[in-house]
Image (tube, rainbow, N blue to C red):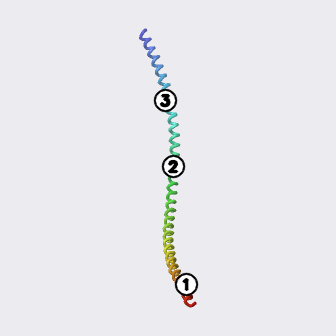
Amino acid sequence: QQVINMMTELKGKGEKMVEEEQKTYATYAEWVDDESKRLGFEIQDGEAKIEELVSYITKAESDATELGHAVEKLDAEIMQLTTEKKEATEIRNEQHDEYLKISKDYGESVDALQRAIQVMS
């Protein structure tokens, strides 16, 4: 009789343990399912973000190339304008030197005429 009682107790304990394990497993399975769904959504969001960033990078590279060409054109224009400015400065300096010579010559001519007028008067 005692053996039967012990066996019955063990059977009851075993059934309780099985029920607890089933509850734990159900909780764990639900958590795994929830985490799988959550991670699935995060992966989708991550992939969408990656596509968005790749598109942004492609556009940025295109803009950088376009702006690089614009800078090259502007650099060429600056070089041309610098050369033209140098040439214009040289011409202006030559014309100024010529003006100074003519002005001095005219000044000397006027002085000579004034002395000649004084001598004749």
Quarter occupied by the C terminus: bottom right
Q: CA distance from mark 2 to mark 1?
A: 82 Å
Secondary structure beneath label 2: helix
* Label 2 Cα crowd, 10 Å radius (few <14 / some 14-19 / many 20+): few
Quarter occupied by the N terminus: top left
Q: Are marks 3 and 1 in contact (CB under 8 Å)?
A: no
Front disc: 2 or 3: 2
Q: Which badge, 2 or 3, comes first in the chain's sequence?
A: 3
- Residue that carries the numbered disc 2 in the rendered image: 53
* Label 1 Cα crowd, 10 Å radius (few <14 / some 14-19 / many 20+): few
Front position in the image: 48 or 115: 115
Q: Amino acid at mark 2?
A: Leu
The image's mark for residue 28 is 3
- Residue that carries the numbered disc 1 in the rendered image: 110
Q: Residue at x 51, y 45 (%)?
A: 47
- As displayed, is residue 21 above or below residue 95? above
Residue 88 in the image: x percent, y percent?
Answer: 51, 73
Secondary structure beneath label 1: helix
The image's mark for residue 3 is none
